[in-house]
Image (cartoon, helix red, strand yellow):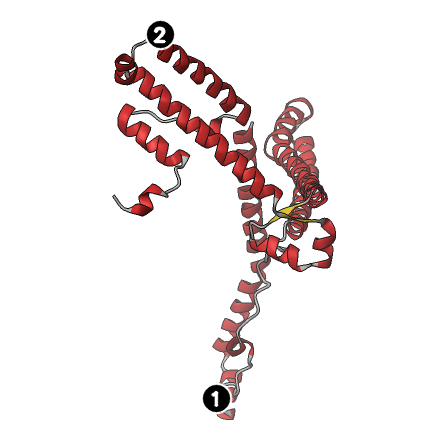
Amino acid sequence: MLLKEFSKKVSTKSLNESLAKQFGTKIDVSKFTTEQLEDARNKIRTKLSQIETNESFDAVHSSNDYQKNKMFLDIINTAIAEREEDKKDDDDKMVVTKADKQSNTKAYQEFKKGNKRYKAGDDLNEGAEEQSALVMASKDMVDRVTGWMEDTAEMQTESMLEIGDKIRDEMGVDKSEEFIGTVKPALESLFTSLESTRDSLTSGVAILTGEGAPSTMGDEVPDEAEAEEPEMEPTVDDDEAGAETEDPEGDEFATADASAGGEEPADRAKRESVELSRRLGQLLAGSKKKA
């Protein structure tokens, strides 16, 4: 046995390992308060004292129950001693105040680095709690707007159609179509506006939490190679240009291209409608899962 093994500090962990090897069990001291550990220690001491008083020397030292409780007592005593040592170390730490934070003192810088010689003062913790409350309040705004979006989506996908069916049955198809034609774009506009508002509020929350405003599509800066204009535009010889001008078939194709381009806004509107329907479906599915 090495000399350093005699001076090795006994810990709760090492004692628990010995207990597990000998009796197949451990004590999770982290689940108990110091007061509970002290109470358990007193009870075990009383039990051991009764065994020592009522049993013979050989019976005491050959009893598994006695040996197990003896190890329990060692673990509890060590755990209490470790907590007292941690408390003493905590009392010796330098307190970092709110003033240190505002002045960005060396003490505050060391505290931010995780230096265990420093601890947060009460006023510094109060400031952190206030900041947390502000973040929660801003997140509540986002949640409320999200709730409005869910209500609007429900009106678009369910309520409006149900009312439209009842109007058709009671007042005729024309009234039903007129109603839906008036209400549908209004609800779509409201949903789009709420969606934009929620994005802005989410960016505000990100600023408070230190994450910064999330980047949006279109904000990317193009590469220099993409930003530069081409040095030379392709040119057409005069003869070729004249030939194209005189060619009637060329004019016919040019007209066809223009007419094809005229259908683009309609296609775009259709795509936007499909995209909006997809977002509504996702939002309603999410709200039903929460419910």
Name the residue carrying label 2.
54
At 54% across and 35% down in the image, what residue appears? Answer: 84
Q: Secondary structure at mark 1?
A: helix
The one nearer the camera, 91 or 287, is: 91
At 53% across and 38% down in the image, what residue appears? Answer: 85
Q: Amino acid at mark 2?
A: Asn
At 49% across and 36% down in the image, what residue appears? Answer: 82
Choose top left, top right, bottom left or bottom right for residue 164: top right
Q: CA distance from mark 1 to mark 2?
A: 121 Å
Q: Position of residue 115 (x, y in %)?
A: 56, 53
Q: Is residue 131 above or below residue 147?
A: below
Q: Quadrant of the C terminus?
A: top right
Q: Disc number at residue 100?
A: none
Q: Is residue 36 above or below residue 246?
A: above
* Count of numbered circles in the view: 2
Q: Does 105 sit left or right of 86 as displayed?
A: right
Q: Disc number at residue 240?
A: 1
Q: Position of residue 263 (x, y in %)?
A: 56, 59
